[in-house]
Amino acid sequence: MSDHSVFVIDDDSAVRDSLLRVLRGRGVRARGFASGSEFFAGLPEDPAACVITDVRMPGMDGAEVVRRLAELRGEAWPVIVITGHADVPMAVQMMKAGIVDFIEKPFDPVRLVEVVRGCLARLSDLDARQQARQAARLRLGRLTPRERQVFDALVAGASNKEIALELKISPRTVEVFRAKVMAKMEADSLSALVRMGLMLA
């Protein structure tokens, strides 16, 4: 399904084992932890992963797990929360704070797998965006200082005439530099170039 791992945090061993069984049965690389403290004590090194955590746990609760993960790993580690009926309002608040989704107990295996698939798809999108940003940054580094000025002006929305006035060169020279910038940045349109600029901002 994905190269990314799913980490399950739940103090109830029966629930934890059930979740792991369902996920592994669908080809997901999954690992369980009995508490938030245990999870953070051996925090995996994965650059990106999906986390499923219970809300109510002794010691560190799900809200604290979400808060600490956001600080440490940000959007590269999206979180799904498992919640009992009484905890739904809390889960909704946690969604506003950044969790991907919540699953109510007793969980439906089909719904669980759907949510995890969505979580893993987000990670694949994130990987693709990071790779695109890295590639664009490398191409940007190949621009000459003058080409970089033209690139910045185009991304800012300046016209050829405005760029010519700003850089004290002819509009024809701007066109030449613009063509070089488009070629070096591998942009097939001005909008593609602008998207790259926004991505690198």
Image (spheres, rainbow, N blue to C red):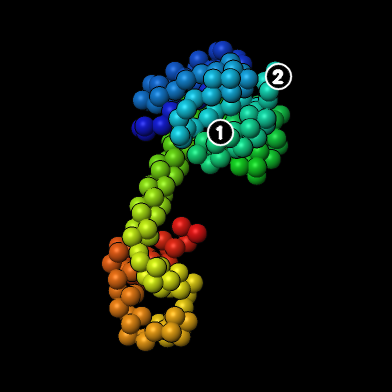
Dots 2, 1 in contact, CB < 8 A = no
Q: Read off the residue under disc 1.
A: 80
Residue found at x 44% / y 40%:
123
With 91 as the anchor, is 137 left or right in this view? left
Amino acid at the residue labelled 1: Ile
Q: How many other residues sit within 10 Å of disc 1, few (<14), some (14-19) or many (≥20)?
A: many
Percent across and percent down for residue 120 are: 43, 37
* Residue identified by numbered label 2: 59
Which amino acid lies under the numbered mark 2 shown in the image of this protein?
A: Gly
Q: Is residue 32 visible?
A: yes
The answer to which of marks 2 and 1 sits earlier in the sequence is 2
Vertical arrangement, residue 92 with respect to residue 104, above or below? below
Residue occupying image coordinates x 38% and y 21%: 25
Disc assigned to residue 177: none
Q: Nearer the viewer, residue 21 or 192?
A: 192
Judging depth in this view, the residue of 57 and 137 nearest the camera is: 137
**Is 11 left or right of 149, judged from the image as shown?**
right
Residue 153 lies, in percent from the top left, at: 46, 73
Q: Position of residue 105 (x, y in %)?
A: 60, 25
Q: Is residue 156 left or right of residue 151?
A: right
The residue at the point 36 percent across, 80 percent down is 174
Disc 2 is placed on an element classified as: loop
Residue name at image x 63 percent, y 20 percent:
37
